[in-house]
Amino acid sequence: MKSKDKDKLKNRKTFQQGTLLPAIRAALALRCNIQKRSHFDRKHYFYADQPAGYQITQYYRPFATTGSIILHDHDGIASEDGKSVEIGIKQVQMEQDTAKTVLQPPSEALLDFNRVGHPLIEIITLPQIHHPQTAAACVKKIQALLQAVNAVTTGMELGGLRADVNVSIRKKGVDAALGKRTEIKNLSSIKAVEDAIIAERNRQIAVLTDGGTIEGETRGWTLGASDTVKLRGKEGEVHYRYMPDPDLGPLIIGNDLIQSISENLPQLPDQTIAQLVKQHGLTLKDAKTLVALDDGERLDYYDSVRQELADLRAQSPNPTETVEQSVDQKSDVTVAN
């Protein structure tokens, strides 16, 4: 093989197989259908956060489609949504990350290229969310699901998850299509999701009230700000010039792999909360707290303590005394009898 051909193979992009397993776990947790065959595409656009001039994604044939997530009132949805609401998942696709943009008001931005090209999954919901509070609850629930199945390395505040939200409005009580949408990029906290949607909703209402029109735009949001900021014009799908990626072949996922991952999927948060309430007698609030805190470590501690207490009770003719002695020995705290 010639040296030139070797260089071509060395620089050729390859699919990182290690990204597939957590991606499938995430899709199954979101009740998606895993596609046996999917493809990678190039999404072309020129912007400072994408030095290659294109992004590898799965626009036409993603690896997972048609899922859903159910939000309950105890998840923090808006009261207008009632006891529960089901949000459809259009698709889950694998793609590569872009640079991190840090806005520096009033007119500058910093770019961090360390994450460019890193693999990620994008979860696309259907436009079925009608309240900022419910949107924030949806992102929080998705984060909990991903953490439960070990499909995310850390939470939003540390960069393990980001949210892009699309906002469009229409008059109340009018059965009409939603208006022109804008997209707010890279929101990094649950509070930022709700606050940014409220700010953009209010901006669009003000524009239309003054007789203006909403432009399709990509906008940014800084925590603590009162307004969103235009980053660039929003291009339509035709302008991205999607094309099959010539370096990456189709992704084939076998039924045996899907079945194996599905059978070994950890218990999801809703199931755990229900079990804590019904079988262990915890309040809903306490059960949610155990599941949510410290990435599940509090729940692990609770289970280990509960099991140890159960063992002590089974071994001792006087369970209460034995438990008190055990607590005294482990914590160096004098227990009054």
Image (spheres, grey):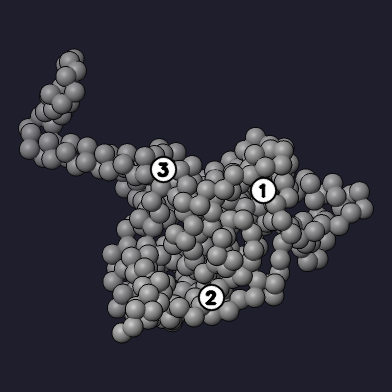
Which-is-in-front pick, marks 1 and 3?
1
Rendered location of residue 255, percent (x, y): 34, 80
Given residues 251 and 288, the one toward you in this image is 251
Rendered location of residue 310, percent (x, y): 17, 40
Could you classify mark 2 by the number of other residues whose Cα lies within 10 Å: few (under 14), some (14-19), or many (20 or more)?
many
| Whether residue 214 is visible | yes
Disc 2 to disc 3, C-alpha distance:
36 Å
Rendered location of residue 88, percent (x, y): 57, 65
Query: Is 98 located above or below residue 154 in the figure?
Result: below
Mark 1 and 3 residues: CB-CB less than 8 Å, in contact? no
Could you classify mark 3 by the number of other residues whose Cα lies within 10 Å: few (under 14), some (14-19), or many (20 or more)?
some
The amino acid type of the residue labelled 1 equals Gly
Helix, strand or loop for disc 3: helix
Helix, strand or loop for disc 1: strand
Mark 1 and 2 residues: CB-CB less than 8 Å, in contact? no
Helix, strand or loop for disc 2: strand
Given residues 183 and 55, the one toward you in this image is 55
Occupied quadrant, residue 99: bottom right
Residue bearing mark 2: 41
Q: What residue is at 43 percent from the left and 81 percent from the top?
A: 249
Residue lying at the far front in this picture: please name it.
3
Disc 1 to disc 3, C-alpha distance:
29 Å
Rendered location of residue 162, percent (x, y): 53, 51
Residue bearing mark 1: 220
Q: Is residue 171 left or right of residue 298?
A: right
Residue bearing mark 3: 292
Occupied quadrant, residue 108: top right
Q: Is residue 112 left or right of residue 337?
A: right
Residue 147 marker: none
The amino acid type of the residue labelled 2 equals Asp
Query: Is 328 located above or below residue 261 in the figure?
Result: above
Could you classify mark 1 by the number of other residues whose Cα lies within 10 Å: few (under 14), some (14-19), or many (20 or more)?
many
